[in-house]
Amino acid sequence: MRVNLVAVQTRLELERYRSFAAFRSAMSSLAQKACRTADPRLPSVLVFPEGLGLFLSLAPYYYEMMSGAATVTSAIWRVGLRKWPSLLLTAARYRTAGLRTALLEHGLEAREAYFDTFAQIARQEGVYIVGGTGFFPDVVKRPLKRPRVAGREVNNVAPLFAASGTLLLQSRKLNRASRWERRFAFAEGSAAELYPAQTAVGRIGVLVCHDSLRERNLERLDALGTEVLAVPAYNLAPWLSTVRGTQITQEAAWLDRGLPRLIAGRENIQYAVCSMLVGSIFDLRSEGRSFICQNGVEASRPPVLALASSFTEEEVVVAQVELGTHVLLNTESQLALGSVPRHPRRDIPLRVN
């Protein structure tokens, strides 16, 4: 089956989070642009970036307070100083402190708005969508009862929606890879929750950002039959800077040492789609080039099938691929092509500067 794989490289703009309606409009416009860029005759899988939903729990409620702040910390302090009675009640209810309390304050509504946005887009455009990630609590839904927050944890979670708008799975990020992520205080997920969704276009698995650089995560999803690996990513370091403690740039780490090499030789993973967040809000600045890569390529075709031209601008990256016709090269052929090192190091710990 021929399929469009699409990485929707998305720009951070506080204005997009002014309200739930503004966010829905911005994401819908991006998805429509992505669908126009892809071949409309083919089914499509769209992947949005990590961190896309972070400010949806805050800005729609506190936009005026947060506007003009220089840092995330100062923006949160502005909210805290003016809304401390309400936040204090939330902190007591969930026995939390700091940013997690702020994320739980409106976490239920924000999660519902975020998930509904991408479910609606998937249904309207008739595409499969990995809706980036947001920092949300778990929610319990039962017939005849109102949804409620379960527990007091906040997860960095990536939802996958079918073309019907049905939620197929939620992938929680397993590893906090930077000081920013430790600061956001999200709970780490469990590897036991990693599994692909069986869809009409094949098995789609999701690993959030640096989770895709962990050998065991790739082994598990590959063993479970994943054919397309979706990777929402958020790179906080300058794209052309070197990874701390090495002479390797962030770009080389992602493109030369990352997914294109790490999926080589896998039994089932045929393609990986990595979508990057770009732009800045307050002191959070992200750069990256979204890409789509293939496992077991022929000599005349590079392992990176499509690559964003910019690491700072919004962009749609598309590749038309064949699913269900996976043929791996033998080891000697891969070595001759330089696609697999003789002693591959697949678990590359990247640290954000």
Image (tube, helix red, strand yellow):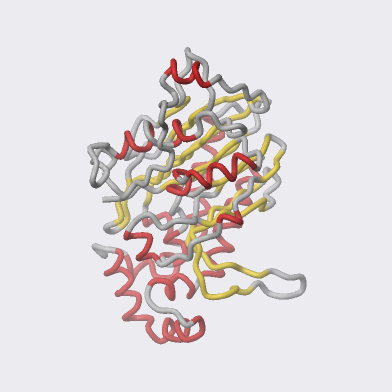
Q: Residue at x 43, y 72 (%)?
A: 100
292 to 68, vertically: above or below: above
The quadrant in which the N terminus is found is: top right
Q: How many marks?
A: 0
Which residue is situated farthest in the right direction here? 143
Q: Nearer the viewer, residue 2 or 14?
A: 2
Q: Name the quadrant containing residue 228.
A: top right
Q: Residue at x 43, y 60 (%)?
A: 54
190 to 269, vertically: above or below: below
In the rendered image, residue 178, in percent from the top left (x then y), is placed at 34, 56
Can residue 127 be seen in this snapshot?
no
Can residue 34 be seen in this snapshot?
yes
Q: Is residue 175 left or right of residue 189?
A: left
119 to 81, vertically: above or below: above
Q: Nearer the viewer, residue 159 or 267?
A: 267
Q: Residue at x 66, y 53 (%)?
A: 167
Q: Is residue 144 left or right of residue 331?
A: right
Q: Nearer the viewer, residue 89 or 249?
A: 249
